[in-house]
Amino acid sequence: MIYVAIVGMGKIGKIRAKTVNDNKNTKLIAAYDIDSSQLNGFDDIVKCSNVDDIFNIEGLNAVIICTFNKFAPEYTIKALNNNLHVFCEKPPARTSKEVREVMEVEKNYSLVLKYGFNHRYHHSVIEAKKLIDNNVFGKLLWMRGVYGKAGGNQYVKNWRNNKDESGGGILIDQGIHMLDLMRFFASDFEEVKSMVKTNYWDVNVEDNAFAIMQTKDHVLASIHSSATQWRHKFLLEMSFENGYINLDGILSSTRSYGDETLSIAKRQFEDDTFAMGKPREEKIFFDTDESWKLELDEFVDCILNNKKVYNGNSEDALKVMELVETIYNQSGYYIDK
């Protein structure tokens, strides 16, 4: 049995708590939140009034960190130094420098450190990855991603729009998921052109980010991360030599991002009369979100079987944070000092 504590029991912390309680190999024994009322209903655990108390609980094996970005690296380092396995939500930090500081500590221990890039575990993404790895459509040519939020009356007050606590705006908060998927499907991007702006919201971070990127193998990608979409939207289109894969919608607790679908089609233009521009498309709908469960399962498997983290390791965290910073810095919006 792996005994787990959670730091940060907001919306995501509670989702993680459920997956811990549902897993036969894990048991939640303690939690901390700056707002103690968030711990109401968790009657059979230790409720810590100080975050440092978490890391010294007798018998504890692992910590799940669901805090503001500002505190994620600090708490991760404390957990590692107390010989605890760590699952930390994304973003891993506010800057790549902070991630490197964590990695310097990580290399001193034989512990599991995993980051919560949850979208890799959605069934549409898993199926798309299989198609790409099996070379079903040939070489990847380009990707086009849009990830947008509706905003809302409370958007300005959200901690994610406080640069000191978050490190940035919509790009580091939500767009980072799309960037991680693009790296997952292609590889690292070596050339980036970007435009990052605050166009509407009265916040000290960006509400829109556009970027065009290219890998060393000349795979092109564009991303638009937006807090002025006025609806929740997720769309990732990928074009290959012999066809395309589109991911449209992604399941969430509110289902506000629409149905999660995977659309695939073979390139058809040999028959200019009937097939040109309208290939036969197959659309698959996914109505179950097991991403939170599958993510914890990998964390547990790595601990129990001494495996390396495949999805969301510290190198993934560093690479995607470096890409986020490049988009910021290349646009001139944030200058890394």
Image (cartoon, rainbow, N blue to C red):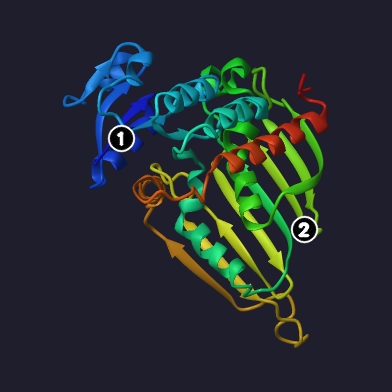
- Tell me which residue sits at (69%, 73%) in the image: 138
Q: Which residue is mark 2?
A: 219
The reply, left or right, for residue 102 in relation to residue 335 is left
Q: Which mark is residue 174?
A: none
Where is 147 relative to 72, above or below? below
Please name the amino acid that badge 1 sits on: Ala
In the rendering, at what x and y percent does residue 41 appear? 20, 25
Q: Quadrant of residue 241?
A: bottom right
Residue 82, image x and y in percent? 40, 24
Q: Which residue is mark 1?
A: 17
Q: Residue furthest left?
A: 44
Q: Which residue is more in the foreground, 125 or 322?
A: 322
Where is 3 relative to 95, above or below? below
User: Around disc 1, counting alpha carbons within 10 Å, would you say few (fewer than 14), some (14 to 19), or many (20 or more)?
Assistant: many
Report the side of 35 relative to 59 (left or right).
right
Horizontal and vertical percent position of residue 86: 43, 34
Q: Position of residue 93 (x, y in %)?
A: 58, 27
Identify which residue is drawn at 81% across, 58% down: 218
Q: How many marks?
A: 2
- Three-letter amino acid code at disc 2? Val
| Disc 2 crowd, CA 10 A, few/some/many (<14, 14-19, 20+) | some
Please determine whether, in this image, residue 199 is positioned above or below residue 216: above
